[in-house]
Amino acid sequence: MTTKKSTTLLVFEAVQDLHAMEQVVTRETLAEHTGLKLTVIDDRIAILVDDGAVLRVQRGVFVPAPEHPPARPISKTILPGGAVKIEIGDDVLTLTPRESRMLGELTAGAGQQYAAVEAGHQAAVVNAELALKVKQLQRRLVLLEGGGPPEQLGLLDVTQGAPGGAN
């Protein structure tokens, strides 16, 4: 007895295969590779993109999302004398002080990248909060200058946090 693959699985495997062969993955190459109609390819790709299994890298070009195993617990212990034990899951490395410094130099870029990404996220949050406050203040200014009743302006009462001062 043979089991028939779903079209979604067929398209997903085709994306993986074409990408592994360093081919540009487009709806047309997927149609050629699978024998499915473009309308079916479009529908299946949309589902795979929504599910996060496939990434759209530019208009009409797709790649499989990277798959990584779950992160393992990691610990670092500094021993007397300066030696360092790094534990990653069940794996243990014992490093001399010099090896520890060298490993630190090699991973410093990843640490800086993490810090930059986190700073960007925090800046985006602060920016969004400030933009909301500026918008609220602009609306209040319009009201104070005689721009109309608060409910017509959709004003938020900054002190109450709800439209028109209601809470």
Image (cartoon, rainbow, N blue to C red):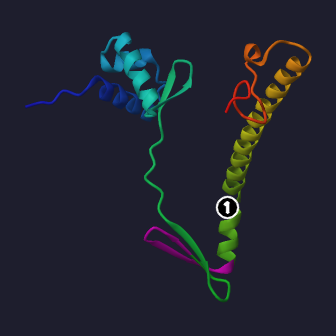
Reading the image, the residue beneath label 1 is 106
Residue plotted at (65% across, 67% down):
103
Magenta segment, prevailing SS (helix, strand or loop): strand
Secondary structure of residue under mark 1: helix
Up the image or down, 2 lies above or below 42; here it is below
The vertical placement of 157 against 145, above or below, is below
Q: Above or below — where is 12 with respect to 113?
A: above
142 displayed left or right of 160:
right
Q: Position of residue 92 (x, y in %)?
A: 49, 74
Please identify the residue farthest to the right as the structure is shown: 145
For the point 72% across and 45% down, the residue is 122
Mark 1 crowdedness (10 Å alpha carbons): few <14, some 14-19, many ≥20:
few
Please say if 74 is above or below 10. Answer: below
Q: Is residue 96 left or right of residue 165?
A: left
Q: Quadrant of the C terminus?
A: top right
Residue name at image x 66 percent, y 73 percent: 100
Q: Quadrant of residue 124?
A: top right
**Quadrant of the frame with the N terminus:** top left
The image position of residue 82, as x and y in percent, is 67, 84
Quarter residue 154 falls in: top right
Q: Which residues are magenta?
A: 86-97
Amino acid tagged 1 = Leu
Answer left or right for 35 relative to 147.
Answer: left
Viewer-proximal residue, 32 or 115?
Answer: 115
Q: Is residue 155 magenta?
A: no
| Residue under the image location 73 percent in, 42 percent down | 120
Residue 158: percent from the left, percent from the top? 78, 33
Q: From this viewpoint, which residue is outermost toward the front?
A: 166
In the displayed image of the protein, which residue is found farthest to the left? 1
Looking at the rendered structure, the number of numbered marks drawn on it comes to 1
Residue 123 in the image, given as x and y percentages of width and height = 76, 42
